[in-house]
Image: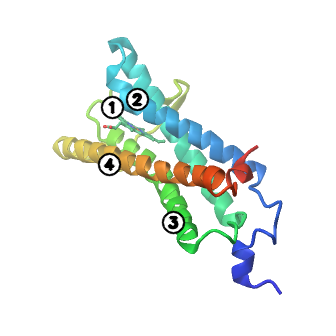
């Protein structure tokens, strides 16, 4: 008889268990966009003067795209059961993996949202309307843009700091997430990576 605990962890119960095509596409698309956006965010001020504005604008557009894709991914996650982790994994590793995944979902929302709040509180927002990829007009967050200018200035700086710190949390979690996947691949020789491969 298959207990509930077994159905969550037993690799033999579902030898071909893997993520669906939708989950795989969303995973790698979001991963690529996030890594690209970290590079653009960290290097924004180092580009030649003429490039800084287009680079920051592209960073914002990619960030909003990630926000939309992350919401789709969360919808997928709440409507599907992911393939169970192999039963051989120690429970501390399963708990750590689930905790990291939960925090990654949280960051996929909180990071772009903090950037959007930071940008909405920018004093130049009114004179620099936002367009996604130079094409689609995109709003600032209304309740922030309508605040008193002095308060907006303070919030701009606070949200900017929050955005930076959420970035640090992302680097730590990505190191754990990628490190875990590679450990299972090369040290434990029990691939979980192939379940997320196209
Ligand atoms: C996937 C989502 C995002 C990621 C991973 C991300 C990451 C980053 C990182 C790592 C930085 C550099 C922070 C530092 O070290 O000080 C940054 C800066 C910034 N981000 Fe984001 N961000 C995202 C989304 C957004 C969004 C949606 C917006 C606005 C709509 C935004 C606006 C900004 C701005 C204005 C800066 C400062 C750029 C400059 O140096 O002038 N970000 N971001």
| Residue 70 in view, yes or no | yes
Residue at the location (80% across, 70% down)?
12
Answer yes or no: do the residues labelled 4 and 3 have beta carbons within 8 Å? no
Q: Nearer the viewer, mark 4 or mark 3?
A: 3
Answer yes or no: do the residues labelled 1 and 2 have beta carbons within 8 Å? yes
Please give the residue where the numbered disc 3 appears in the rendered image: 96
Please give the residue where the numbered disc 2 appears in the rendered image: 129
**SS label for mark 1:** loop
Residue at the location (52% across, 62% down)?
102
Residue at the location (69% across, 58% down)?
190
Going by the image, does 186 lie left or right of 111?
right
Circle nearer the N terminus (2, 4): 2
Q: Residues within 10 Å of mark 1 (few under 14, many from 20)?
A: few
Residue 124 vs residue 39, the one in the foreground: 39
Numbered circle sitting on residue 165: 4
Numbered circle sitting on residue 171: none
Horizontal and vertical percent for residue 122?
Answer: 29, 36
Give the spatial CA distance, label 1 vs label 2: 6 Å
Give the spatial CA distance, label 2 vs label 3: 42 Å
Residue at the location (74% across, 55% down)?
19
């Amino acid at each position: 008889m298959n207990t509930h605990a077994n159905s969550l962890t037993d690799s033999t119960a579902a030898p071909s268990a893997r993520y669906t095509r939708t989950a795989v596409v969303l995973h790698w698309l979001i991963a690529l966009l996030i890594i690209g956006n970290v590079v653009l965010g960290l290097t924004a001020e180092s580009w030649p003067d003429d490039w800084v504005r287009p680079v920051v604008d592209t960073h914002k557009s990619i960030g909003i795209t990630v926000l939309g894709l992350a919401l789709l991914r969360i919808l997928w996650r709440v409507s599907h059961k992911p393939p169970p982790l192999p039963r051989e994994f120690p429970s501390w590793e399963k708990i750590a993996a689930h905790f990291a995944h939960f925090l990654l979902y949280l960051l996929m929302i909180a990071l772009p949202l903090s950037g959007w709040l930071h940008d909405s509180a920018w004093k130049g927002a009114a004179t620099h309307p936002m367009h996604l990829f130079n094409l689609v007009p995109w709003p600032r967050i209304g309740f922030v843009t309508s605040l008193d200018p002095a308060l907006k200035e303070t919030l701009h700086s606070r949200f900017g700091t929050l955005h930076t710190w959420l970035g640090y949390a992302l680097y730590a979690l990505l190191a754990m997430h990628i490190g875990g996947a590679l450990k299972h691949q090369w040290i434990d020789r029990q691939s979980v990576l192939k379940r997320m491969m196209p």
